[in-house]
Image (spheres, coloured by chain):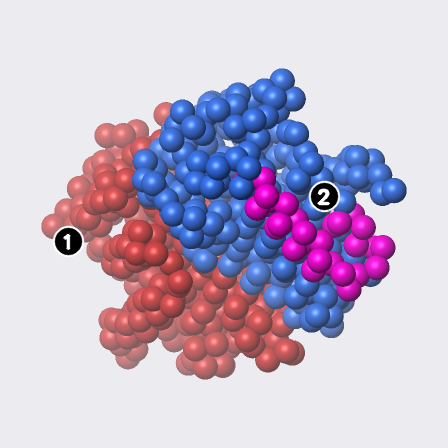
Chain colours: A red, B blue
Amino acid sequence: MFDLKGYLNDQRRIIDAALQDYIRQLSISERMRQPVAYAVSAGGKRVRPILCMAACAAVGREQTHALPAACALEMIHTYSLIHDDLPALDNDALRRGQPTCHIQFNEATAILAGDALLTMAFEVLSESGVCAPEQEAMVWLKVLRIISQAAGCRGMIEGQARDLAYEGMKLNRHDLEDMHRLKTGALIGAAVHVGGLLGLGTAQQTERLLVYAANIGLAFQVVDDVLNVKGDPAILGKAVGTDQSRQKNTYPALLGLVESECYAGDLIDRALHALDIFDTKADPLRAIARYIIHRNH
Amino acid sequence: MFDLKGYLNDQRRIIDAALQDYIRQLSISERMRQPVAYAVSAGGKRVRPILCMAACAAVGREQTHALPAACALEMIHTYSLIHDDLPALDNDALRRGQPTCHIQFNEATAILAGDALLTMAFEVLSESGVCAPEQEAMVWLKVLRIISQAAGCRGMIEGQARDLAYEGMKLNRHDLEDMHRLKTGALIGAAVHVGGLLGLGTAQQTERLLVYAANIGLAFQVVDDVLNVKGDPAILGKAVGTDQSRQKNTYPALLGLVESECYAGDLIDRALHALDIFDTKADPLRAIARYIIHRNH
C-alpha cells in the first residue's frame, strides 16, 4: 500500500526548500524579497510541483531533473493568486487564513511581487536550460513554451478573464468546463507535461500523462465545488455554502450533487485508465488521483 | 550621411507589423485582445526593439533574426508601463496623450493585460527558440535568461520598487544612477545584448555592445530630465517643469543643468567610442547615440 501522506510530506519539504533557495539567491532588496517570500511560503498544497516531479519519476528518471520546473510552476501559481486577490479582481483579504499580499503589505507591492514571481519563473527555467547538458537545450525550450502558453492567453489568464466576465451570469456546462480548463487545468496539464518531458518520456507516455492531467484537473474542481456544499467547515478550514450564496457557477448548481459526485468519479477512472501503460513508478500519480475523490478538505 | 529619420520610420513599421501579427495569432478572446492591442499600439518610440535589431545588424547578420526578441522586449516594456500607470503605483490617467489602459478599460483588465503581455513575451521567445535550427537552441536559452533577468528582480522590477520607495526622499547620485540602471537601463542593455547574440556576434563584439548600451541608457535618462527643465512643451508634447514641482530626483536637481548636459555628452562619447571596432553596419547605432543628445522631444 502506497503511503501517500508520507510521500506528499516529503515532496513538499523538497519543494519548499528549493523555493526558499531560489528566493534567497535572488539579488533583490528586502523590499521585494519579503512580499515574495511571504506569498510563496503561505502554505499551499504544492499540487503543481508535486505532479510535475511525479510525472518525471513515472517515466523513469530521477525526479530532481524536474525540480526547477516544479518550482517555476509554483511561482506562477503563486503570482496568479496574488493578482487574483487584488481589490480590482476578487478583492480577497484572506487566503488560507492569512492576510493576502496586498493586505499584509500594500497594493503596489502586491502587484510588483506578482510580476516578480512570474518573471522569476522564467529566470529559473532559462537558467536551468542554459546550465543543462547541451543536448537537452531543445527540451528546455519546449518546457518554456509549454509553461508560458499554459500561463498566458491560451490558458490561465484567459480563464481568469472569463471568470471575471461571467460574474453574475448563468453558465452552461460547456462554458463552465472551458473556463476551468483554462483557469486551472492548463497549468496542471503543463506541470505533468513538462515533468514527462524532463523525464525524457516517450511520445506515448507523454500523451497518456496529458490525458491523466486533464481528467484530474477537472475532477479536482468538481470535488472542490462539492465540498463547498457538503464539506465540514472544521475540516475544510473555510466556510461552506459560500458558492451558493454568491450564486457562483458550480457543478452541484448545474448538475446536482449526486450527479456531480458521479462525474468526479468518472473523471478519476479515466485518469487511472490512462496510466495503464506505466509500472509501479506511476504509483504516486495513481494515489494522487484516488486521493482527489476521497479527500474531505 | 546616414538618414536616421527614414531608418527609424522603416524600423518602426517592421516592428509594429510584427507585433500586430503576434497579437492577431493569439487564440484569445476579444476581451483580452482589445486591451493588449490598445496598449501595444499606443505609439511608443520602439527604442528597445530598434536597438535590438540594430545590434544584430551591427555584428553582421540579417536583422530579422532578432525580430521575435525585439517584439518580446516591446511587450515587456508595454506591460511595465501598464502596471506602472495603475492607481496603486503612479496613478497616471494619460500616456502619450491617450487614456492609460485602466482608464480606457478598467483596473482588473489592465492588471490582466499587463500579465498577458509579460507572459506573451516568453511565449514568443520560447516558440522562436523551438522553431530555430537545433544548433541555435542554446543561444535562445541565453536570450531567455538575459531578458528574464533584466525584467525581473535584478532589473526592472527592483528599479520600480526603489522608485516607489524613494518617493519624497532626496537621493545621492549613486542611488539615483543605480535606480535608473535597474529601472530602464537593464532592459535597454538586454535589447542590445540579445541583438548581438542572435546576430552570432563574437564575445568581444558583445562586450562592446554592452558598454554602448549602458552609456546610452543612462544618457537617455539624463537628457529626459534636462528636457523636463528646458524643453519646449509644444515640441515635447507634454508639460515641462513637472519634475521640479513634484520634487522628483533628477540630474538637473542634483548636478545643475550645465553639468547634466556635459554628463550626457560624456556618456554619448563613451558609447560611440565602444563602437570603434565595428564597421559601417553599426552606423544606425552611432546615429541613435548622437540623436539622443541632440533630440528636443
Q: Residue furthest left?
A: A234
Q: Residues within 10 Å of mark 2 (few under 14, many from 20)?
A: some
Q: Is residue A94 left or right of residue B70?
A: left
Q: Residues within 10 Å of mark 1 (few under 14, many from 20)?
A: few
Residue under label 1, please give it: A235
Which amino acid type is marked by label 1?
A: Ile
From the top left corner, tell me how far across and down residue A28 is, in percent: 38, 58
Residue in the picture at 55% in, 50% down: B185
Which amino acid type is marked by label 2?
A: Arg
Instruction: Report the quarter where the C terminus of chain B lies.
Output: top right
Residue under label 2, please give it: B290
**Residue A257 seen in the figure:** no
Q: Chain of mark 2?
A: B
Q: Residue furthest right?
A: B1
Q: CA distance from mark 1 to mark 2?
A: 68 Å
From the top left corner, tell me how far across and down residue B111 is, in percent: 44, 36
Residue in the picture at 59% in, 80% down: A133
From the top left corner, tell me how far across and down residue B281 is, in percent: 83, 55
Q: Is residue A249 above or below residue B283?
A: above
From the top left corner, tell me how far across and down residue B57 is, in percent: 79, 55
Q: Nearer the viewer, residue B23 or A12?
A: B23
Kind of element beneath mark 2: helix
Q: Nearer the viewer, residue A248 or B297?
A: B297
Image quadrant assignment for residue B36: top right
